Amino acid sequence: MDNTLREVMTGNPTTADSGDSVTSVARTMRDGGVDVVLVVADGNPIGLVSDHDLLSGVLADGADAEHLTMGEAVQDDLVVVDVEDGLDVVTQRMREHSVRQAVVMENGVPVGVVNAGDPAIQGRPGRIDAPTPEHARKTDEEIL
C-alpha cells in the first residue's frame, strides 16, 4: 500500500463545459468509452458526473437532456485533492463528503480523477459510501 495518488488516479480527465448539454456529454462518454467526466466553468472544476449519475439521476427524473446543461445537472459535492496528498488523506476526504470520486489537481490544473473503487483506496481503513439518490443530485427547485 505504498502507492501514491499519481499511481492510482486516472490521468488526463475528460472534461465538459458547464454550458454543454447533458445529451452532448452522454455522447462524449459513449463515444470515448468514458465513465466519468469533469465539468468545468471558466476552466475551473465544478463537478464530476458519471454515467450512473446521468442514468439514475438526470434522465430517470425525466429531465430534458437536450436542453439541460451540465452546470444545472452536476452535483455540488466536488472533492478536490492535491496530487501530493497521501492516499489516507484522500480516502478521508472522500469519506467525509460521501463521494466515490475526487478531482486531483497539480498547480491549480486538474490532472486526474481518483475513484473509491481502486484497490489501493479500498484497502484503506474506513468505508466510502456513495451518496443516496436524494443527496446525489440537485432537486428540481435547485435546477430551475
Image: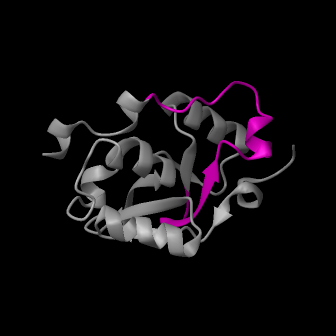
Quadrant in which the N terminus is drawn: top right
Residue 109 lies, with reference to residue 139, above or below; the image says below
Residue 89 lies, with reference to residue 12, above or below; the image says above
Residue 104 lies, with reference to residue 89, above or below; the image says below
**Image x and y of residue 130, in percent:** 54, 33
Q: Looking at the rendering, which quadrant does residue 142 occupy? A: top left
Residue 17 painted magenta? no
Q: Residue furthest left?
A: 144
Residue 108 painted magenta? yes
Is residue 42 among what the camera can see? yes
Nearest the viewer among 112 and 21 is 21
Q: Residue at x 63, y 42 (%)?
A: 90
Q: Residue furthest top?
A: 126
Q: Residue at x 56, y 36 (%)?
A: 93
86 sits left or right of 134 in the view? right
Is residue 14 among what the camera can see? no
Nearest the viewer among 87 and 65 is 65
Q: Residue at x 27, y 57 (%)?
A: 71
Q: Residue furthest bottom?
A: 31
**Image x and y of residue 53, in percent:** 44, 47
Q: Residue at x 27, y 59 (%)?
A: 65
Q: Looking at the rendering, which quadrant does residue 21 occupy? A: bottom left
Which stretch did the figure color magenta?
104-132
Quadrant in which the C terminus is drawn: top left
**Image x and y of residue 33, in percent:** 59, 69
62 sits left or right of 45 in the view? left
Residue 79 lies, with reference to residue 41, above or below; the image says above
**Image x and y of residue 126, in percent:** 70, 24
Colour setting: one colour
Q: Residue furthest right?
A: 1
